[in-house]
Amino acid sequence: MKTKFPVDAFAKIETPFYYYDVELLKKTLDTVCKEAAKHHGFNVHYAIKANFNPRILEIIAASGIGADCVSGGEVAAALKAGVSPSHIVFAGVGKTDKEIALSLDAGIFCFNVESIPEIEAINTLAAERGVVAQVAIRVNPNIGAHTHANITTGLAENKFGINYEQLDEVIDTIEVLNNVKLIGLHFHIGSQILVMDDFIALCGRINELQTMLNENRGMVLPHINVGGGLGIRYDAPDKYNIPDFALYFSTYAQHLKLFPGQQVHFELGRSLVAQCGSLITRATYIKKGTCKQFIIVDAGMNDLVRPALYSAYHRIENLSSHKADEVYDVVGPVCESSDVFCKDRKIPATQRGDIMAIRSAGAYGEAMAFGYNCRSLPQSILSTDIE
Ligand code: LLP
């Protein structure tokens, strides 16, 4: 299913804006639900950080998928979109009292906890309310994923999670507190991972840890949350528009050794929303340098920061031109040399006013936009807005 861009309609809309292909989003959600829930009985929580556009969230909530939140704002957004509190997990190293209180009052399913002071804070706030908060320990599995250094999270040097050596102390702490209950273990090794071996390595660590807890403490926790991280094909957004969820979930089904009754949870962000979104922009000027040609577009790094921040590749298409390719750098108008979407890329000969699509931008695109240079935040258009 190739995303079809309504170029005639785009011609009347002010750029830049994010365009979301609702049909593809729904098909992706259907595929995830089918592969995870129906085939394996796995629970999926959507990592809201990838895209918190309220209309996108509503579509995701309507599919029955839960939410993985990392701030009080995300918990509120999930509830507003219609996610049931019993399907909300809340992670993050720095949850404030206000965020914890909001989540306790809403009755969320589980806090993924990352330190002893945090567990104590949750316990105090839960006691004040006369409730018991369910918590899962985020374990740092010390696994390096094959991805960009800025988006690995599961290494000992990262700020996330609790290291193996501290695990006993953390469990002991939870056991003596009256208003927190340990229900699970949580892991996450990083993002944009396409190599299944990384997930297999994580399964190995989880199996080891489960055996250790069982042998040493006679402990079997009911919930195992393996985080997210499934990558997408930025190089071929139409050919691989829906990630290979069947392979992903069956990898876990095959390698994760579970005790009877244990439930498995996933926190997927990018793989659910990346391919349905594109940043639509116009060529403002074509500028010839001494050794380069630049397409200066009206979107900037403030609208889509991934290329500037991670040297990320996004396919760029000229939706108005079918001419022969030329070689360009596509750059934005922001006063930073890193405001570059791509360098030395073959793109059909482009002229001022042409409409371009920066593909695979549905995840960590709109969600990471900012207002540098007094630029407006990008608007969003859903395919269903256009008749
Ligand atoms: N769970 C936890 C604990 C996470 O930290 C993340 C992402 C996810 C789930 C969702 O991971 P996903 O399925 O989307 O890979 N801004 C970066 C990505 C940052 C990911 C942060 N954590 C980017 O644009 O590539």
Image (cartoon, rainbow, N blue to C red):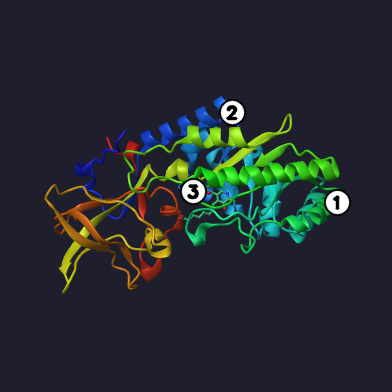
**Quarter of the image containing the C terminus?**
top left
Question: Relative to 94, does residue 31 appear above or below in the rendering?
Answer: above
Q: Residues within 10 Å of mark 3 (few under 14, many from 20)?
A: many
Q: Residues within 10 Å of mark 1 (few under 14, many from 20)?
A: some
| Residue 379 position within the rendered picture, expressed as x and y whole percent measured from the top left | 36, 52
Residue depicted at x 26% and y 41%: 5
Mark 2 residue type: His
- How far, Cα to Cα, is label 3 from label 2? 21 Å
- How far, Cα to Cα, is label 1 from label 2? 34 Å
The residue at label 3 has a CB less than 8 Å from ligand 1:
yes
Q: Secondary structure at mark 1?
A: loop
Q: Going by the picture, which residue comes out furthest to the left?
A: 323
Which residue is disc 2 drawn over? 40
Q: Residues within 10 Å of mark 2 (few under 14, many from 20)?
A: some
From the viewer's side, name the closer residue of 123 and 44.
44
Quick one: label 3 or label 2, which is nearer the N terminus? 2
Which residue is disc 1 drawn over? 177
Q: Where residue 193 is drawn, which disc sits there?
A: 3
Residue depicted at x 58% and y 57%: 153
Mark 1 residue type: Leu
**Quarter of the image containing the N terminus?**
top left
